[in-house]
Image (cartoon, rainbow, N blue to C red):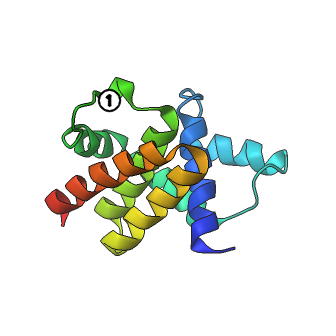
Amino acid sequence: MTRHESRELAFILVFEKGFQEDMTVIELIENALELELFPENAFAETLARKVCDNLEQIDNAINENLVGWSAKRISRVSRAILRLAVCELMFSDVPVGVAINEAVEITKKYASNDDASYVNGVLGAVAKKIR
Protein backbone atom coordinates (compact mmCIF):
# COMPACT_ATOMS: atom_id res chain seq x y z
CA MET A 1 0.00 0.00 0.00
CA THR A 2 1.34 3.43 -0.92
CA ARG A 3 1.75 6.32 1.52
CA HIS A 4 -1.04 8.12 -0.31
CA GLU A 5 -3.41 5.19 0.25
CA SER A 6 -2.32 5.04 3.87
CA ARG A 7 -3.07 8.75 4.28
CA GLU A 8 -6.53 8.15 2.83
CA LEU A 9 -7.11 5.44 5.44
CA ALA A 10 -5.91 7.83 8.16
CA PHE A 11 -8.28 10.48 6.79
CA ILE A 12 -11.18 8.03 7.00
CA LEU A 13 -10.33 7.26 10.63
CA VAL A 14 -10.04 10.95 11.55
CA PHE A 15 -13.28 11.70 9.70
CA GLU A 16 -15.09 8.84 11.48
CA LYS A 17 -13.72 10.01 14.83
CA GLY A 18 -15.58 13.28 14.24
CA PHE A 19 -18.84 11.31 14.40
CA GLN A 20 -17.78 8.87 17.13
CA GLU A 21 -16.35 11.23 19.72
CA ASP A 22 -16.97 8.77 22.56
CA MET A 23 -14.79 6.10 20.91
CA THR A 24 -11.01 6.10 20.86
CA VAL A 25 -9.15 5.80 17.58
CA ILE A 26 -7.96 2.39 18.71
CA GLU A 27 -11.56 1.26 19.16
CA LEU A 28 -12.45 2.60 15.71
CA ILE A 29 -9.51 0.73 14.19
CA GLU A 30 -10.38 -2.49 16.02
CA ASN A 31 -14.01 -2.29 14.86
CA ALA A 32 -13.00 -1.58 11.27
CA LEU A 33 -10.51 -4.46 11.28
CA GLU A 34 -13.06 -6.83 12.79
CA LEU A 35 -15.63 -5.90 10.15
CA GLU A 36 -12.93 -6.09 7.46
CA LEU A 37 -13.59 -2.49 6.45
CA PHE A 38 -10.02 -1.42 7.04
CA PRO A 39 -6.80 -3.25 6.22
CA GLU A 40 -4.08 -3.26 8.85
CA ASN A 41 -1.85 -0.31 8.18
CA ALA A 42 0.64 0.88 10.77
CA PHE A 43 1.30 4.24 9.07
CA ALA A 44 -2.41 5.13 8.87
CA GLU A 45 -3.05 4.00 12.44
CA THR A 46 -0.09 5.95 13.81
CA LEU A 47 -1.05 9.09 11.91
CA ALA A 48 -4.69 8.93 13.02
CA ARG A 49 -3.65 8.39 16.64
CA LYS A 50 -1.21 11.29 16.42
CA VAL A 51 -4.00 13.56 15.15
CA CYS A 52 -6.28 12.62 18.04
CA ASP A 53 -3.51 12.85 20.64
CA ASN A 54 -2.66 16.40 19.51
CA LEU A 55 -6.10 17.58 18.44
CA GLU A 56 -6.23 20.76 20.50
CA GLN A 57 -2.87 22.00 19.25
CA ILE A 58 -3.75 21.04 15.66
CA ASP A 59 -7.13 22.76 15.79
CA ASN A 60 -5.55 25.89 17.26
CA ALA A 61 -3.08 26.01 14.35
CA ILE A 62 -5.94 25.60 11.86
CA ASN A 63 -8.18 28.18 13.54
CA GLU A 64 -5.38 30.77 13.66
CA ASN A 65 -5.03 30.51 9.88
CA LEU A 66 -8.62 30.51 8.68
CA VAL A 67 -9.28 33.35 6.29
CA GLY A 68 -12.86 34.54 6.03
CA TRP A 69 -14.28 31.41 7.65
CA SER A 70 -15.07 30.25 11.13
CA ALA A 71 -14.14 26.75 12.19
CA LYS A 72 -17.82 25.81 12.32
CA ARG A 73 -18.28 26.60 8.61
CA ILE A 74 -15.62 24.14 7.44
CA SER A 75 -17.08 20.87 6.21
CA ARG A 76 -16.32 17.74 8.20
CA VAL A 77 -14.38 16.37 5.24
CA SER A 78 -12.16 19.44 4.93
CA ARG A 79 -11.71 19.62 8.69
CA ALA A 80 -10.50 16.01 8.84
CA ILE A 81 -8.11 16.58 5.94
CA LEU A 82 -6.76 19.78 7.49
CA ARG A 83 -6.23 18.01 10.80
CA LEU A 84 -4.33 15.21 9.10
CA ALA A 85 -2.09 17.53 7.09
CA VAL A 86 -1.42 19.93 9.97
CA CYS A 87 -0.47 16.94 12.10
CA GLU A 88 2.08 15.92 9.50
CA LEU A 89 3.39 19.50 9.27
CA MET A 90 3.72 19.83 13.03
CA PHE A 91 4.72 16.37 14.20
CA SER A 92 6.66 14.66 11.41
CA ASP A 93 9.53 15.21 9.05
CA VAL A 94 7.35 14.97 5.94
CA PRO A 95 8.32 17.75 3.51
CA VAL A 96 5.87 20.66 3.51
CA GLY A 97 5.10 20.26 -0.20
CA VAL A 98 4.30 16.58 0.21
CA ALA A 99 1.95 17.13 3.15
CA ILE A 100 0.10 19.92 1.35
CA ASN A 101 -0.09 18.12 -2.00
CA GLU A 102 -1.38 14.93 -0.39
CA ALA A 103 -4.06 16.89 1.46
CA VAL A 104 -5.14 18.70 -1.70
CA GLU A 105 -5.37 15.44 -3.65
CA ILE A 106 -7.46 13.78 -0.92
CA THR A 107 -9.68 16.87 -0.81
CA LYS A 108 -10.22 16.72 -4.57
CA LYS A 109 -11.29 13.10 -4.22
CA TYR A 110 -13.63 13.49 -1.24
CA ALA A 111 -14.78 17.13 -1.53
CA SER A 112 -14.71 19.77 -4.27
CA ASN A 113 -12.10 21.78 -6.14
CA ASP A 114 -13.20 24.86 -4.18
CA ASP A 115 -12.52 22.97 -0.96
CA ALA A 116 -9.15 21.88 -2.34
CA SER A 117 -8.16 25.49 -3.02
CA TYR A 118 -9.21 26.53 0.46
CA VAL A 119 -7.36 23.61 2.10
CA ASN A 120 -4.27 24.53 0.08
CA GLY A 121 -4.45 28.14 1.28
CA VAL A 122 -4.96 27.29 4.93
CA LEU A 123 -2.13 24.74 4.88
CA GLY A 124 0.18 27.21 3.17
CA ALA A 125 -0.48 29.72 5.96
CA VAL A 126 0.01 27.08 8.66
CA ALA A 127 3.25 25.90 7.06
CA LYS A 128 4.70 29.42 7.03
CA LYS A 129 4.12 29.75 10.77
CA ILE A 130 5.27 26.25 11.72
CA ARG A 131 8.38 25.76 9.65
Q: Is residue 100 above or below residue 33?
A: below
Rendered location of residue 45, percent (x, y)? 59, 58
Please tell me which residue lies in front, 102 or 48.
Answer: 102
Residue 52 can be seen in this image = no
* Residue extending farthest right: 35
Q: Is residue 122 above or below residue 66?
A: below
Badge 1 crowding class, 10 Å Cα cut-off, few under 14, some 14 to 19, many 20 or more, is: few
Rendered location of residue 24, percent (x, y)? 57, 38
Q: Based on the displayed image, in which of its 4 quarters is residue 96 positioned?
A: bottom left
Question: In screen coordinates, is 92 left or right of 108?
Answer: left
Q: Residue at x 56, y 26 (%)?
A: 22
Q: Based on the displayed image, in which of its 4 quarters is residue 10 positioned?
A: bottom right
Question: In screen coordinates, is 72 left or right of 7?
Answer: left
Question: In screen coordinates, is 44 left or right of 118?
Answer: right
Disc 1 marks which residue? 71
Rendered location of residue 101, percent (x, y)? 43, 66
Q: How many marks?
A: 1
Q: Quadrant of the C terminus?
A: bottom left
Q: Based on the displayed image, in which of its 4 quarters is residue 100 positioned?
A: bottom left
Q: Is residue 94 above or below residue 128?
A: below
Rendered location of residue 109, percent (x, y)? 60, 52
Residue 98 can be seen in this image = yes
- SS label for mark 1: helix
Q: Residue at x 23, y 54 (%)?
A: 126
Please tell me which residue lies in front, 61 or 65.
Answer: 65
Please tell me which residue lies in front, 28 or 94.
Answer: 94
* Residue extending farthest left: 129
* Residue extending farthest front: 113
